[in-house]
Each structure stands twice: as C-alpha cells, then as structure tokens.
Image (spheres, rainbow, N blue to C red):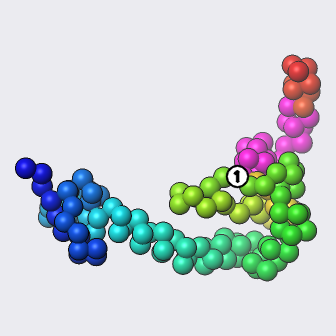
Amino acid sequence: MMKTKICPKCKKKLVIEEFHKNKSQSNGLQSYCKSCTNKYSRKHYNNNKLKNVRKRLKKFNLTLEEYDKMFGEQNEVCYICGQSETSTSKYGSINRLAVDHNHQNNKLRKLLCRRCNTILGLAGDNVNLFIKMISYIQEHS
C-alpha cells in the first residue's frame, strides 16, 4: 500500500513522492506538495525579481532606469558579440545583460552577455593575454 499525505495548501491526497524531503520535519517531508511549493517559489521569485535587480545595480550606483537606457542604446544586445542574452535563471526566465566595469577604478563600461563577461573576468582584463589568444586562434585556424 502506497503511503499518502494531504497537502494543506491544495487539499489533495498525494503519494509521498509528491513532497520534497525535509529532515527538519518529524515525517521527513515538506508540508506542501511539490506543485504548491513550485507555484509559491515562482510567485515569490517574480515578486522579488525587480527588487533583486535593483539591489545588484545599486552595487554600481546605477538605477534601473539608467540600466534600461544603456540597454536601449545597445539595441538590447551584448556590446562585444552583438548577441542577445541567452542564459536563463533557474525558473527559466532570461537573465539581464551583465554590467561590465573596470576592476581597478570601478568605472562602468558597457552591458555584456554572460559569456563575454565571463571571458573578460577570467582573463582579468589582460590585453596581452587577449593578443596572444588572437594569435593562437589565427595560427590554428
């Protein structure tokens, strides 16, 4: 016989596999079913999305309106590769372009996709390294 539990949110009697595990609970399961938990998480995420964006922009002393202006001036694409952002959040929404900045003086540069921003970050803005990389690619093309 399959063990079941009633979700207090949707009032459905479901098999225990429909509940996330939670060691802190006496029965080892979350109170709400996976479906109700996911609905709450999405709603909570969407409600706080703008707040989270503003919080990240505050780090650069940039308002959402200023970000949107930069975004429009770049035709809504990455400044380096000219592509739209394709990386997604865990909920499936497309991330915003990253705010690139000079790590020495913290001066804002442009908006970049995750790939270009990561490449710059890993190379540490080292121009000589980029020149060597270009030579390497040309040599092996």
Left or right of 80, for residue 40: left
Q: Position of residue 77 (x, y in %)?
A: 83, 58
Q: Position of residue 50 (x, y in %)?
A: 63, 77
Q: Main secondary structure of the magenta part?
A: helix
Question: Hey, which quadrant is residue 11 in on the image?
Answer: bottom left
Q: Nearer the viewer, residue 6 or 122?
A: 6
User: Disc count in the image?
Assistant: 1
Disc 1 residue type (three-letter): Thr
Which quadrant: the C terminus? Answer: top right
Residue tagged by mark 1?
Answer: 86
Residue 132 visible, this angle: no
Question: Hey, which quadrant is residue 40 in on the image?
Answer: bottom left
**Residue 128 painted magenta:** yes
Task: Decide: is 2 above or below 130.
Answer: below
Residue beneath the point at 78% across and 48% down = 116
Left or right of 59, for residue 36: left
Residues rendered magenta in the picture: 114-133
Q: Secondary structure at mark 1?
A: loop
Residue 78 visible, this angle: yes
Q: Position of residue 69 (x, y in %)?
A: 85, 75
Residue beneath the point at 74% across and 55% down = 85
